[in-house]
Amino acid sequence: MAIALSHRVKRIKPSPTLAVTARAAKLRAEGKDVIGLGAGEPDFDTPPHIAEAGIEAIKGGFTRYTNVDGTPELKDAIIAKFQRDNGLSYTRPQILVSSGAKHTIFNLMMALLDPGDEVVIPGPYWVSYPDMALLADGVPVFINAGASQGYKITPAQLEAAVTPKTRLFILNSPSNPTGAAYTRKELEALGAVLARHPRVMIGTDDMYEHIWWGPEPFCSLVTACPSLYDRTVTINGVSKSYAMTGWRIGYCGGPAELVTAMATVQGQSTSNPTSISQKAATVALAGNQACVAEMNKAFKERHDFIVRGLNSLRGVSCLPGFGTFYAFANVERAMANLGLADDNAFAERLITEALVAVVPGSGFGAPGHMRLSFACSMATLEKALERMRKVLGSA
């Protein structure tokens, strides 16, 4: 019997990044030596002092429900982090801890959007933003920023995209998938536009804040534009910076009324984040940060290597990023050289002939591109480039 699914779920599609990871895993199970460059997951183990905090939580019996919105001690560590790193002051009612930053963003959209409300999303964008907006009955509105402008939108583009129906603006800097990041001056210019539209709320996804090598220090939107404080939810998490993807802890600071509503949504869906993970996240945020700097150094070395290597391939061009562990390459000329119709066919050619799994750029709103994660060893990246060169040739 065919099951009639909801119109809501029919609007969305599976995550292309997860699909690529699953495809690579399937081929490996068949005995093929596939190099997976799809998943955004650090290859480092969780630092020992953080992992030990989780072990001690289990041994100490901290395995029961916590407050839906997070433990007081983790909230205090988050408050201290925001003050220390971003110069932002929050109180406990303004903090929500969720099961990953993706969950935080989902809660934000569910708490804020009514049917027909528009969500302005700069592209290239993280694959889940549009589908989460659709699940919340919102309407994604895209602003396209290509390589010619460094994959960053302009104030004029933002002004043109805002309408009376605009309810939320999402900003991700440094960006998944491009690694592009906004300077303080650029954020101030975008903030000046947003200041003219008081109905528009703002969500800043700062997940890659500490995976950073830009020419100036990282700056969050509200740090650059304090006047937007009462309209902005600043989102972060421990997954990337501390190699804690599986621990599933994200968090945010924002207006108390909105954060309380987000906690209500969470209370009727997942309830509290994992108690054990909250203990570990508290230690991660409040403890010695040397481990973050060590991992960041490795990511920067890999970034330089992979960008240089991609630009040495025939028909491929890749701009350097300021952070994250992704390279976003234009492959339009390579597609033409191979006689391929689109980036999906290009990715298929790479996985079948080179045994290298990448994510097609169309999943990020940028056809003719591919995203590669360099959150893997240098040896793996060397092997991947060698394989791709056999298919594409040298520049």
Image: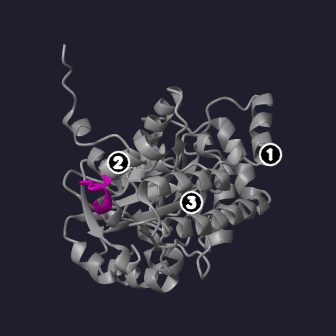
Between the C-alphas of marks 3 and 1, the distance is 22 Å
Q: Residue at x 68, y 36 (%)?
A: 276
Please indicate whether residue 381 sits to the left or right of residue 112 in the image: right
Q: Residue 221 in the image: x percent, y percent? A: 48, 74
Between the C-alphas of marks 2 and 3, the distance is 29 Å
Q: Regarding mark 3 in the picture, which secondary structure is present there?
A: loop
In front: label 2 or label 3: 3
Q: Residue at x 50, y 63 (%)?
A: 327
Residue 77, picture quadrant: bottom right
Q: Residue 47 in the image: x percent, y percent? A: 76, 49
Q: What's the residue type where badge 3 is placed?
A: Phe
Q: Is residue 274 visible?
A: yes
Q: Give the residue number, with chain letter if any, for mark 3.
A: 325
Comparing 242 with 385, the one in front is 385
Q: Give the residue number, with chain letter if any, for mark 1.
A: 48
Please indicate whether residue 252 sits to the left or right of residue 52 in the image: left
